[in-house]
Amino acid sequence: MPDEWEVVGLATGSRAGDLAGQARRFKPAAVAITDENGRGELAAAMNGRTGVLTGPDAAVRLLDEVDCDCVVLAITGAASLPATMRAVELGRRVAIANKEALVMAGALLMPLAARTGATLLPVDSEHSAVFQALLAGRRADVRRVILTASGGPFRQWSIQQMEQATLDDALNHPTWNMGPKVTIDSATMMNKALEIIEARWLFDLDPDHIDVLVHPESIIHSLVEYVDGSMIAQLAAPDMRTPIQYALTYPHRRPCPAPPLDLCAARSLTLIAPDVEKFPALKLGHDVARMGGAAGAVLNGANEAAVGLFRQGRIRFGDIARLTWRVLDAHPRNDRPTLEELIAADRWARNEVTECRISS
């Protein structure tokens, strides 16, 4: 949709080459990169245009310097939080593609959005589906929300097999092509735990009214059940272009480059309850959503650190959930944390995972 949209700013963490290529193609007013070593390559790509921002706060400064209608936030992990907060403070339309900002700071972000007039639109396929299904009725008439999960690569593995799973095994997702962190979260089903917490804040839901079902075909992206027993589901081919585009064009729909769904080819649609013994990380979602406070920040930080250790070959696959549980149990409760305290809780949790690993 080049006639409707103009890219005015782009940001990345360290991939200067990719950002430079996009800067040449889209000619934004400014670009931002956390890694200061990328400045030279980006300055050349900008070809004399102003606005190469570097350093840990580069994405936040980009938001302050570039006037825009919509901010698409796809920064992974806790690093997303400062930019997300700033976009909401500025009252922007925010297409939010990460889970971690709402997991960590939903209690701060949603009231802030209400004050500034910012609109948070989900890009996650599951939350986009819930958002669309909620348009079918009144919020007061919602009985529950059902998030679907592919089941990841280990859906049919035993607990014993999963204990021996390698990094390559965990990265072999049967449906989606995602980055390594998100793919491993799918393998542990920690991604669904994070999505439960995200849904709790994004849609103002009671955690007990959020369920998860395993749906290997990844065609039903989520469902909403109303008090009269009606269930509204959003179905589409497993292609992220659909929810991304809807977040950009809402409330309008446009033809999308994603392939149309062929229901006859789908043959069958399976929905089964998840095995929480095999996937103990899943239970963390409801527990942390009920706890509130800094628990989301602790969960996020501990999980990111544990996934990092697994990718380095320093812990087994099953240790990811075990270490995260241990750190969450030990965290000092803080029911009304500030942004700075949430960031500190995230940092504490990462350090605790390392300490647990060393002492175990």
Image: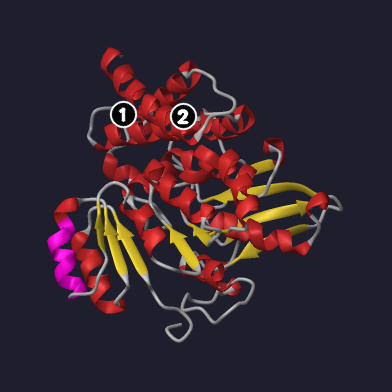
Q: Closest to the observer: 136 or 8? A: 8
Q: According to the image, what is the colour scheme of the structure? A: secondary structure
Inter-mark Cα distance, 1 to 2: 31 Å
Considering only order in the chain, which callout, 2 or 1, is on the residue closer to the N terminus?
Answer: 1
Secondary structure beneath dot 2 equals: helix
Q: Which mark is residue 91?
A: none
Q: Closest to the observer: 167 or 32? A: 32
Residue at image location 22% in from the left, 58% down from the top: 15
Quadrant containing the C terminus is: top left
Q: Is residue 284 left or right of residue 117?
A: left
- Residue extending furthest bottom? 3
Callout 1: 10 Å neighbours few (<14), some, many (20+)? some
Callout 2: 10 Å neighbours few (<14), some, many (20+)? some
Type of the residue with mark 2 = Glu
Q: Is residue 7 left or right of residue 200?
A: left
Tag nearer the camera, 1 or 2: 2
Q: Which residue is mark 2?
A: 341
Type of the residue with mark 1 = Arg
Q: Is residue 355 above or below residue 93?
A: above
The location of residue 18, given as percent across then percent down, is: 23, 65
Residue at image location 12% in from the left, 62% down from the top: 40
- How many marks the image carries: the answer is 2
Q: Closest to the observer: 3 or 83? A: 83
Range covered by the magenta-colored residues: 38-47
Q: Which mark is residue 316?
A: 1
Q: Is residue 318 left or right of residue 22?
A: right
Secondary structure beneath dot 1 equals: loop
Residue at image location 50% in from the left, 51% down from the top: 150
Asked if marks 1 and 2 touch (Cβ < 8 Å), the reply is: no
Q: Mostly what secondary structure, the magenta segment? A: helix
Q: Closest to the observer: 276 or 42? A: 42
The location of residue 84, given as percent across then percent down, is: 47, 51
